[in-house]
């Protein structure tokens, strides 16, 4: 299906900080120099040798879980990127982990046509108006053109397990957060490699969940993704590997457009945040124990049964859930090891009869969640039900008295131009839907010739949890005004930032359903209607 992919030609992380509400002192430049406003001192020194040793402090304090966001964000912000990325394959790489805990080593695999390259380590957040902090930069490393990728016929998996590690990083002083390695080739080209550093515990914290399985599903590096191959959908990959670079945008997949704007806002609000990926959710059923909230970001589509079970259990124990996108928890997957480690192969056949598990172990089949066998529509968790794409339309407010819209000045019928799309959700009682649930915005759109509606919804549970679904894949990019033509400017950025601030603040305080119980308020045309369908 189509994706909300904000334009990235000039979208470095610093530019993402230039919000109408969140004034920023942005700067754009090349490779940071020690003491040049890029985290001077231990955090900004160029390492004496590669790999770099140390970083910019541990960011610990008295906050729950041992990570003090306020202290971390008081450190100096730094330059984070270039306005021009250069040739895509001039430099590219990947890490051998999608996430680590501080102190766990991480290897980077880089291929470049340049004679040398340097690697800079940035933590993203909110540093006095800048959105990143430089921890350190390696000395120049020798450039190497790595081996050609391998192709697995039948499942069309592309991997580069034969690449040699370029360098290994020690991470003992890295605080939890979302990180970017910037690969700077001596030719002037650069790309990013994303990494999540997990906190020690989620109890009492807001968990920001990076949707790395969805990033990888759309990754067509080497010619194949879970959506297409060299000849289209029928030729698509059935299994994709994390052992390869990302092919789109700036090398950091969906992070810079669909996730980082929320990270910057959450840290600017000094919320007690911690970080994890959906692969961590798959591996650790206790990852969310005691968490106050989990924030699912702009496109969080691919879920294993273990991931969904963990998220549902957290809700049922009072953890608030926010789905700040559309099409969440729609594709069922399974994860397997690659030569580089556990859970680095992602399987999604999408069509049940193609999966070798069909009729053998139906619990492992990788059909879509709403599809048989073992159909289990995502609406029982998210509240909204994914409907269709592509669409583009205005968000229309239907319940202005909601606590979530306080202070926005939005009246019934107010329009937020271009905010719906390219994917959308709707409350649909034809599928399992939690109640009480209220629809805050009910927006008429047409998808593939069929009239329909997109819904912003909120429901509460007996456990006290509140669950929010934005109903559009353009919510997070709107926070930084990087959604692209038709969904730009303060008319949407200002109210969406206000609503998201209200949401995050309430969700960080504890079970929101106790202080803000939902009231059943579902439009008549959301009651038992059929979905118009979707693209593969």
Image: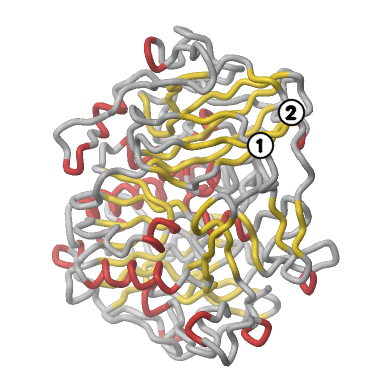
User: Measured from the top left, where is residue 482 in percent x and y?
Assistant: 57, 42
Answer left or right for 348 relative to 325. right
Q: Quadrant of the C terminus?
A: bottom right
| Residue 508 sits above or below residue 49 on the image | below
CB atoms at circles 1 and 2 under 8 Å apart? Answer: yes
| Residue 254 sits above or below residue 93 on the image | below
Distance CA(mark 1)–CA(mark 2): 9 Å
What residue is shown at x 51% (from left), y 23% (from top)?
51
Q: Pointer 2: what residue?
A: 144
Give the farthest residue toward the right: 231
Q: Quadrant of the N terminus?
A: bottom right
Disc 2 is placed on an element classified as loop
| Residue 182 sits above or below residue 368 on the image | above
In the depicted view, which residue is nearer to us: 487 or 223? 223
Determine which quarter of the picture holds residue 220: bottom right
**First in residue order: circle 1 vs circle 2:** 2
Could you classify mark 2 by the number of other residues whose Cα lies within 10 Å: few (under 14), some (14-19), or many (20 or more)? some
Answer left or right for 107 relative to 235. left
In this figure, which colouring scheme has been used for the structure?
A: secondary structure
Q: Pointer 1: what residue?
A: 164
């Amino acid at each position: 299906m189509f994706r909300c992919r904000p334009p990235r030609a000039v979208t470095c992380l610093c530019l993402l900080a230039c919000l109408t509400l969140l004034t920023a002192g942005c700067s754009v430049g090349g490779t940071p120099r020690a003491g040049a406003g890029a985290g001077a001192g231990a955090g900004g020194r160029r390492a004496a040798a590669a790999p770099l040793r140390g970083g910019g402090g541990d960011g610990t304090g008295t906050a729950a879980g041992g990570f003090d966001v306020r202290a971390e964000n008081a450190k100096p912000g730094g330059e984070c990127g270039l306005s021009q990325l250069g040739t895509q394959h001039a430099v590219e790489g990947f890490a051998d982990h999608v996430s680590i805990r501080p102190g766990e080593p991480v290897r980077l695999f880089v291929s470049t046509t340049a004679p040398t390259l340097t690697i800079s380590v940035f933590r993203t957040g909110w540093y006095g108006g800048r959105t990143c902090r430089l921890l350190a930069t390696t000395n120049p490393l020798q450039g190497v053109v790595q081996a050609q990728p391998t192709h697995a016929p039948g499942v069309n998996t592309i991997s580069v397990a034969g690449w040699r590690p370029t360098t290994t990083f020690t991470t003992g002083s890295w605080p939890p957060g979302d990180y970017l390695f910037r690969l700077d080739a001596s030719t002037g080209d650069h790309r990013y490699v994303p990494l999540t550093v997990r906190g020690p515990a989620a109890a009492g914290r807001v968990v920001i969940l990076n949707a790395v399985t969805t990033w990888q599903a759309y990754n067509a590096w080497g010619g194949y993704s879970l959506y297409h191959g060299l000849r289209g959908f029928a030729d698509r990959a059935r299994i994709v590997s994390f052992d390869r670079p990302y092919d789109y945008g700036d090398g950091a997949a969906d992070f810079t457009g669909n996730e980082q704007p929320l990270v910057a806002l959450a840290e600017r609000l000094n919320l007690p945040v911690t970080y994890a990926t959906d692969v961590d959710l798959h591996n650790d059923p206790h990852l969310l124990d005691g968490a106050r909230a989990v924030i699912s970001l702009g496109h969080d589509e691919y879920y294993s049964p273990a991931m969904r079970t963990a998220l549902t259990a957290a809700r049922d124990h009072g953890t608030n859930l926010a789905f700040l996108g559309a099409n969440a928890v729609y594709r069922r997957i399974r994860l397997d090891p690659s030569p580089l480690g556990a859970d680095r192969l992602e399987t999604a056949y999408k069509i049940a009869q193609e999966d070798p598990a069909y009729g053998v172990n139906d619990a492992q089949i990788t059909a879509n969640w709403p599809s048989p066998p073992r159909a289990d529509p995502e609406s029982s968790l998210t509240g909204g039900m994914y409907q269709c794409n592509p669409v583009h339309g205005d968000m229309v407010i239907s319940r202005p008295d909601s606590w979530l819209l306080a202070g926005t000045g939005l009246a019934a019928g107010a329009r937020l131009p271009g905010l719906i799309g390219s994917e959308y959700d709707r409350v649909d009682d034809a599928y399992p839907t939690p109640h009480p649930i209220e629809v805050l915005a009910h927006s008429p759109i047409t998808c593939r010739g069929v009239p329909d509606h997109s819904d912003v919804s909120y429901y509460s549970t007996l456990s006290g949890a509140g669950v929010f679904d934005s109903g559009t894949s353009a919510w997070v990019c709107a926070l930084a005004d990087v959604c692209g033509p038709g969904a730009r400017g303060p008319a949407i950025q200002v109210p969406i930032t206000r609503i998201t601030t209200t949401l995050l603040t309430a969700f960080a305080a504890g079970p929101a359903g106790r202080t803000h119980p939902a009231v059943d308020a579902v439009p008549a045309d959301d009651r038992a209607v059929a979905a118009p369908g979707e693209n593969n």
